Image (cartoon, helix red, strand yellow):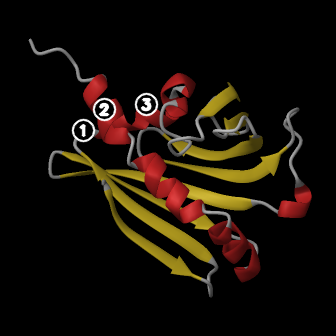
Amino acid sequence: MPVLEVEKDPEAPALRIVAEFAAPVERVWTLYADPRRLERHWGPPGWPATFLRHELVPGSRSHYRMTGPDGERSYGVWDVVAVDEPRSFEIADAFADEQGAPDEAMGWTRMAATFEPVDGGTRVVFVSTFQSAEQLQQMLDMGMEEGLKQAMGQIDDLLRDEEPAAR
């Protein structure tokens, strides 16, 4: 599994996940920038994502749904805050309805992602910051940590499937 480290800090409140992949930064970046590639790993196994709208540029809003094994659906939105391709992006993230209206009762989180070259591959660091320790705990209780680890666990296979042809 590519996830190397998970840190939960209720004082911040934040969740930090570090993973490494055996591919250059530019290839890993495209897995987040391209909606069809993002769909192949954003949801954990059994809960695939479908991006109804996605553009990784500041000021844009992405809208997606995740579909569970019994057909149940959960929707989310990302408001893209900042992008420094291929080094980082920052989004505001919320649950949403099927039209893409954020569920304000669940609150927003901020997620900053960084992509760094390391040992011929890429280290990805996600830091999600929550509005409160209670919101962090609610997300952990809903399976956020395990879901992110499982989702990131699909990336190595995706990178292998899309391996550039040898010359």
Q: Position of residue 57 (x, y in %)?
A: 62, 34
- Residue mark closest to the camera, 2 vs 1: 2
**Picture disc at residue 159:** 2
Tag 1, which secondary structure?
A: loop
The amino acid on which the numbered mark 1 sits, given as a three-letter code, is Ala
Q: Does residue 119 appear left or right of residue 19 in this picture?
A: left
Q: Residue at x 47, y 47 (%)?
A: 151
Sequence-wise, the earlier of marks 3 and 1 is 1
Q: Up-down: is 112 above or below 82?
A: below
Precedes in sequence: disc 2 or disc 1: 1
> Which residue position holds label 3?
30
> What separation in Å lies between label 2 and label 3 (alpha carbons)?
10 Å
The picture quadrant where one finds residue 69 is top right
Q: Nearer the viewer, residue 11 or 140?
A: 140
Whether residue 54 is visible, yes or no, is: no
Which residue is painted at 8% across and 11% down in the image? 167
Label of residue 23 in the image = 1
- Look at discs 2 and 3 and give the one toward the viewer: 2
Q: Amino acid at mark 3?
A: Thr
The residue located at (11%, 15%) in the rendering is: 166
